[in-house]
Image (cartoon, rainbow, N blue to C red):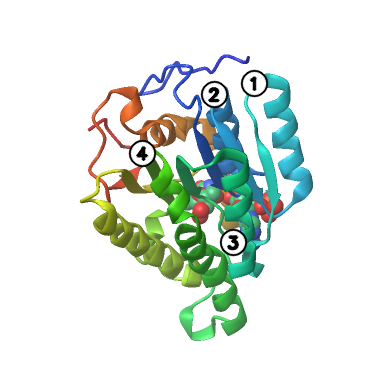
């Protein structure tokens, strides 16, 4: 198995942190999601790799097969087309293969056009909302019973700084991240009393990915951190109570650059 380099991590997980745990990551074929999927597998977890492009998912799957002993599965799925039938089929497949779900990371999203609201195209607005908000809602709802079956589970919504403070020209992307923050807080409030499901939103901040390059084409990518820089926070949150460290309060909004252990 490939050893994980945790030299700069603020949280040091045991190498079996995710053993016997199954975590679904959306947008697992590229960027932060692909790095997270590999990291979870390196720490012993089974990953459900959901994403749009089959070939990218296969590359991550092959890496996991070659470097870990965990059992990953690929779910090619365009979240723009997600509906009740596809969510139910996914839920049945996870139930058959793994029985329950220990973690759900809503990471996939699209940027949409960078335009003022006065000129924002309606079709683009609806598509961004579908991928970035409606799909996470449908997945949360349709997979909730599998999370509830786990001894404990974590749900992480990947947000953005423009989901916490609106900024000109970020249009539907910004509004969708505000909605995602709301979804996260509602779910946290609804599950807090039972105490089994921990819910968080994470703002990764500037990260060296295709999305960042598309939003900031003139930026030198070497000046922003790679997705690996955020894996300590994601594994800390997804590890739940198993790692023995206190967790942030459910419903917390975290920032990958500045977080501290609870
Ligand atoms: N990078 C940053 O600086 C930054 C900053 C703040 C927040 N974030 C957030 O971090 C998360 C990950 O972003 P990233 O930078 O890693 O982006 P990325 O490199 O563009 O990766 C996004 C992933 O989401 C998938 N995806 C997009 N649309 C999809 C759809 N309709 N159905 C299924 N999968 C879809 C993509 O699949 P394909 O590759 O197949 O298209 C890709 O694997 C996003 O929620 C983003 O908003 C990123």
Q: CA distance from mark 3 to mark 1?
A: 28 Å
Q: x and y percent of residue 151 in the render?
A: 37, 37
Residue at which label 1 appears:
69
Instruction: Locate residue 145 relative to residue 44 in the image: left or right.
Output: left
Which numbered disc, 3 or 2, marks the residue that appears first in the sequence? 2
The residue positioned 51% from the left and 59% from the top of the image is 139
Q: Locate residue 29, reporting x and y percent.
A: 67, 44
Front: mark 3 or 2: 3
Residue nearest the observer in this picture, 44 or 95: 95
Q: CA separation, marks 1 and 4?
A: 23 Å
Q: Which residue is mark 2?
A: 44
Mark 4 lies on residue: 152
- Assign a secondary structure to mark 3: helix
Helix, strand or loop for disc 1: loop
Q: Secondary structure at mark 4?
A: loop
Q: Is residue 251 above or below residue 208?
A: below
Callout 3–callout 4 Cβ contact below 8 Å: no
Residue at mark 3: 88
Of callouts 4 and 2, the N-terminal one: 2
Q: Are marks 3 and 2 in contact (CB under 8 Å)?
A: no
Residue 142 vs residue 151: left or right? right
Mark 2 crowd level (few <14, some 14–19, many ≥20, 10 Å Cα): many
Instruction: Answer few, some or many: residues within 10 Å of disc 4's Cα (few below 14, many 20 plus, some between 14 and 19).
Output: some
Q: Assess whether mark 2 and mark 1 are in contact (beta carbons under 8 angstroms).
A: yes
- Distance between the alpha carbons at the discs numbered 3 and 4: 22 Å
How crowded is the residue under tag 1: few (<14 C-alpha within 10 Å), some, or many (20+)?
A: some
**Residue 55 vs residue 155, the one in the foreground:** 155
The span from disc 4 to disc 2 (Cα, nearest Å) is: 17 Å
Q: CA distance from mark 3 to mark 2?
A: 27 Å
For the point 65% across and 44% down, the residue is 30
């Amino acid at each position: 198995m490939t050893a994980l380099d945790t030299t700069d991590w603020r949280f040091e997980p045991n190498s079996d942190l995710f053993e016997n745990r199954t975590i679904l990551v959306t947008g697992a074929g590229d960027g932060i999601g692909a790095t997270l999927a590999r990291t979870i597998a390196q720490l012993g977890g089974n990953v459900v790799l959901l994403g749009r492009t089959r070939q990218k998912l296969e590359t991550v799957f092959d890496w996991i097969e070659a470097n870990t002993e965990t059992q990953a599965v690929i779910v090619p799925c365009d979240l723009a087309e997600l509906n009740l039938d596809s969510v139910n089929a996914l839920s049945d497949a996870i139930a058959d293969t793994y029985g329950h779900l220990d973690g759900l990371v809503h990471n996939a999203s699209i940027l949409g056009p960078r335009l003022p609201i006065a000129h924002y195209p309606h079709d683009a607005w609806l598509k961004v909302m579908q991928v970035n908000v409606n799909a996470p809602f449908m997945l949360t709802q349709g997979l909730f019973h599998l999370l509830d079956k786990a001894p404990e589970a974590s749900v992480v919504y990947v947000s953005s700084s423009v989901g916490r403070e609106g900024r000109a020209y970020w249009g539907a992307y910004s509004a969708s991240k505000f909605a995602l923050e709301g979804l996260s807080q509602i779910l946290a409030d609804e599950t807090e009393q039972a105490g089994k499901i921990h819910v968080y939103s994470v703002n990764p901040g500037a990260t060296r990915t295709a999305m960042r390059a598309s939003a900031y084409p003139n930026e030198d990518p070497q000046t922003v951190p790679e997705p690996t820089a955020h894996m300590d926070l994601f594994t800390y949150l997804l590890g739940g109570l198993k790692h023995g460290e206190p967790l942030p309060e459910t419903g917390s909004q975290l920032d990958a650059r500045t977080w501290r252990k609870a």
